[in-house]
Amino acid sequence: MKARRAVLIALFAAAILLRVADTFRPLDRASWRESDLGSIARNFTREGMNPLYPRIDWRGTGPGYAEMEFPLYPWTVALVYEVLGVHDETSRIISLLLSLGVLAFFWFLARDILAPEAAIAAFAFFAFNPLIFEVSTAVQPEGLTMLAYIAAVYFFSRWTNTNKMPDLYASAAFTSLAILAKATSVHIGLLFAILWLKKEGVATFRNWRAYAFACIALVPGVLWYTHAKYLWLTYGNSLGISNEYHWIGPDFFTNPYFIIGMLRNEIVWVWGGIGVIVAVVGIVLARRERAVSISLIWLASVFVFLIVAARTTADDWANYYHVFAVAPASLLIGFGAGKGISLVREGKRKITSQSVLAMLIVLASVAAFVFDLRSIRQLFLEHRKLEPAFAEAGQIEPYLQRNTLILVSGGACVDADGYALAYNASYMFYWLDRKGFNICSDRQTISAVEGFRSLGAQYFVAQRTDLAKAPGFEGSLGARFPVVTGTDEFVVFDLRP
């Protein structure tokens, strides 16, 4: 027991130290999501702290109210800004603190449903999973989401054993928070519904507690997202909810891209490559155990979401949507590793087919863990590199008059299949501390630029790689508008009369 406690403390300490080392860095990546959350927090401090009206920078001439998840995370960052001033590291520190709660609740869950060795193995895979590591310091709502999400499962699992109402109500409250923090968390309701039906059968439908749970979990989210939809319909700004088409279509069954993309994200970012084999072995050896049952149902509920939103979740950039699968996957890998350790202990005095299998399971577990560590190392090194665009923004900023509207290159308006995409790229607005418009990379024309100019855009901060997508467009711009300044990746055109 002392040895297990020492291993757990060492793992927890190493996980914290690794995250602390990754925390103190600016918002220097060309991340649309981080820049959006950073700008929303900054705008709260400048334009009012009403959390019902989050404001983005790519607002054009409007007030910038945007459809998004409930902005508790950027609003909390803004509260700290009010006291200590605006510092990029503030949001990462808050994410770090949230990540400690995520680790704690996962350990509580693993400890409750797994054997001691399996729980520690599961915690190791979870704490050092690259997606969990990434969201631990990311300026995104996933840190808050995962804290509430895993806490909800922990308390619900406890309730299925103890039948104590405080556990059930705690699960409902955390489920509500998870859905408010990220609407995609709603899929966890499938896990709870199946576990409740397994516990009480059809009597579940006659249990008033089930309806109370549903109300507590869902009503706040329904109210918020109804309001958020109003912001979209009124002001036309959305962080990828209504302005992008995420959903499965008939081509899911004919285009292998979706299945291959989702599996690639799962294998690389969730399962640590060979970790899926460890989990499968554990399932085969003890598929009827409670921990395996809960984990498989949980994983199935996640896959329902991933498949329904396959037009997004299959993309490489969308790997963080798979973060929901990490907890059940880690439980299954930990369960398999624990079974391997037990078999090694049982067969250590003689060599048998069982002892060979046990050693292979343990070696596969170690290999999966090392795979995850390599992925974390890669992410850590990427975070240390200065984003070239960030440095070039510093070169561009002095050439732009203050309080002017700018036009900035954005993403494509539609994908290859003609479905709508959220094209608003926010990072240049955040770095330059300007407001303005985005132009779609697949709709670049002189007349489009003239249209934004008539709305008040005074500079066009154009990305050269996007200009190249419209042959001859950069030359036409240069003939029509003077160049203010240029860098390796950007050229700024003066749109002023």
Image (spheres, rainbow, N blue to C red):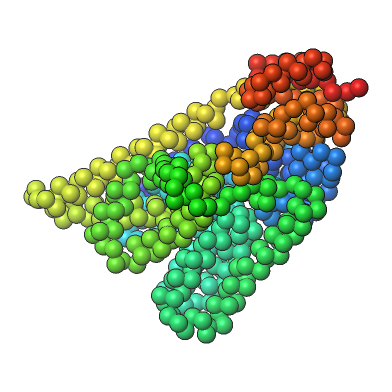
Q: Which quadrant of the structure image shows residue 274?
A: top left
Vertical comparison of 118 with 433: above or below? below
Residue 490, compared with residue 36, is above or below; it is above
Q: Is residue 42 left or right of residue 26?
A: right
In this view, the residue in front, 157 or 295, is 295
Percent from the top left, x then y, of residue 490? 69, 20
Seen in the picture, residue 73 relative to 171 is either above or below; the reply is: above
Picture residue at 42% right of the left edge, 59% below the top: 300
In which quadrant of the rendered image does the N terminus lie? bottom left
Q: Residue at x 49, y 44 (%)?
A: 314
Residue under the point 77% across and 54% down = 233
Residue at far right of view: 497
- The quarter holding residue 439 reads top right
Q: Can the viewer see residue 136 in this picture?
A: no
Task: Count the labels in the image.
Answer: 0
Q: Is residue 35 above or below residue 105?
A: above
**Residue 264 at what x, y percent from top left?**
41, 41
Q: Is residue 149 left or right of residue 236?
A: left
Question: In this orientation, does residue 412 appear?
Answer: yes
Residue 203 screen position, x and y as percent: 47, 84
